[in-house]
Amino acid sequence: MARAQSGRVAHEPGSGPASPAAIQICEGTVRAMEPVTALAGDTVVDVTDILQQTQVMEVLDKLDRELVGLRPIKTRIREIAALLLVERMRSTVGLTARPPALHMSFTGMPGTGKTTVAMRMATILHRLGYVRKGHLVAVTRDDLVGQYIGHTAPKTREVLKRAMGGVLFIDEAYYLYRQENERDYGQEAIEILLQVMENQRDDLVVILAGYKDRMDTFFQSNPGVHSRIAHHLDFPDYTPDELLAIAQLILSDHMYRFSDDAVIAFRAYLERRMAMPHFSNARSVRNAIDRTRLRQANRLLARGGQITRDELMTLEGQDIRVSRVFRQTEPGGAATDA
Amino acid sequence: MPFHLTQGTFSYLPDLTDDEIRSQIEYCLDNDWPISVEYTDDPHPRNTYWEMWGLPMFDLRDPAGVMQEVQACRAAYPQHYIKVSAYDRTKGRQTTALSFIVQRPSRDPGFRLDRQETSDRKVRYTIHSYATDRPAGERFAE
Ligand SMILES: Nc1ncnc2c1ncn2[C@@H]1O[C@H](COP(=O)(O)OP(=O)(O)O)[C@@H](O)[C@H]1O
Ligand SMILES: [Mg+2]
């Protein structure tokens, strides 16, 4: 709630003696957007005003539009937004409480949108005044943990300082903890993190991300971290339909499109690719599209002559079917290249 | 009137409050200036390079991180001068853009003027910080 700044709250003449709540406000515990003039039980806050001020709906709708699927995630984000909006309204009428803890864990397979959602989350938290700047600092173990004694604390603190005012996103957070080595420097980073998560909630939000099973093990060994995480969001794998929709979204971003035949080919591609190792959801889709663009370019150049705008835009089924993914399943087909 | 060291921006003003310091730091960060915290107990104006409190801070977005270092430096050196400096790295500038004091010792006796008679009735003037008569580290102790 932009809690760093304190605001002065004026009392209009005739609004009666200041209630205890009002006195608390005068001491600067909350910043009210406008002067609070009355704090009786029937004081009114206008939801429309608050929505307009924060423009949070815009971001939430954008999230709905631009991210395919992720129903449970989107629902939870809306719930968090509602909580913060109500918190904001409460503070306008002098109902102050320690702001809710909002550290989170994002679990899911690679390419399920954890990093992407974290960036959106930073924006949303900023709009709602929970963080002051709204940037995202994404790190892994190497950014936090040092190589020798005395190296870790300054390194971790530096990252924390950069993340202040925004969101610190720790990818594959479980690598901070090495069960087999109790002298591992990761432990030191965890302890500093814990302190900041508890005492400097005003300054930053921490999001831990990674595979679900490993994160669960990590939480078991680090109950202190677990207890400071307010929201556990589990990112589901995408269905083939969702992956296709993601592909269409990426294509239109780049001003490309699939031909009808390409859609069929891409469905077949997905079916095979999903069964293969190292499948990473939306990221695999993005990579597949990049390779398909490459093949389309080669095809067009090899053909030569005049090329229409439509042709430049359209990825054809053949651009997809030459993928290694199709070759691999043919009898005796040894994979060569992409 | 007690002595009041005037070095850097704002030094003719009453001491800045922490909120004011925070706003100035925010201004620096908004300008993309890395910030460093420095301290000394030798306030001679020619002592340009104060001790560094940690490394300069790059890529911060919010003043909270700098304030944290200022507080830590104050805790470690409660009777030193502490300043915050912001560096403008843009080409053609490459210089300190803003530098201001964020802590003073509770009492600084100030400077005296020394006159040195030299040849041909010439006089050389220099200033001398009373504090530096005492050993480093004990200069501004109560
Ligand atoms: N629901 C989605 N809708 C559209 N694109 C998505 C979606 N989820 C992920 N992507 C895209 O897939 C890529 C990988 O997502 P990312 O957030 O990095 O996944 P993770 O962090 O879980 O590995 C990004 O380019 C992102 O834009
Ligand atoms: Mg990621």
Image (cartoon, coloured by chain):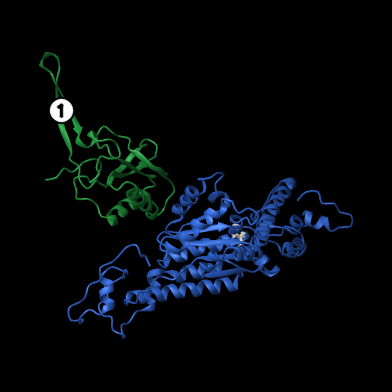
Chain colours: A blue, B green
Q: Quadrant of ligand 2?
A: bottom right
* The quarter of the displayed image where residue B39 is located: top left
Q: Residue at x 44, y 71 (%)?
A: A100
Q: Secondary structure at mark 1?
A: strand
Q: Residue at x 82, y 55 (%)?
A: A327
* The quarter of the displayed image where residue B129 is located: top left
* A226 on left or right of B115: right
Q: Is residue B109 visible?
A: yes
Is the residue A276 above or below the residue A14 in the image? above
Near-viewer residue (B21 or B32): B21
User: Label 1 crowding class (10 Å Cα cut-off): few <14, some 14-19, many 20+?
Assistant: few
Measured as percent of width and height from the top left, residue A176 is found at: 58, 55
Q: Which residue is farthest bottom?
A: A42
Q: Which residue is mark 1?
A: B114
Q: Which residue is farthest top?
A: B120
Q: Which amino acid type corresponds to the residue marked 1 in the rendered image?
A: Asp
* B80 on left or right of B119: right
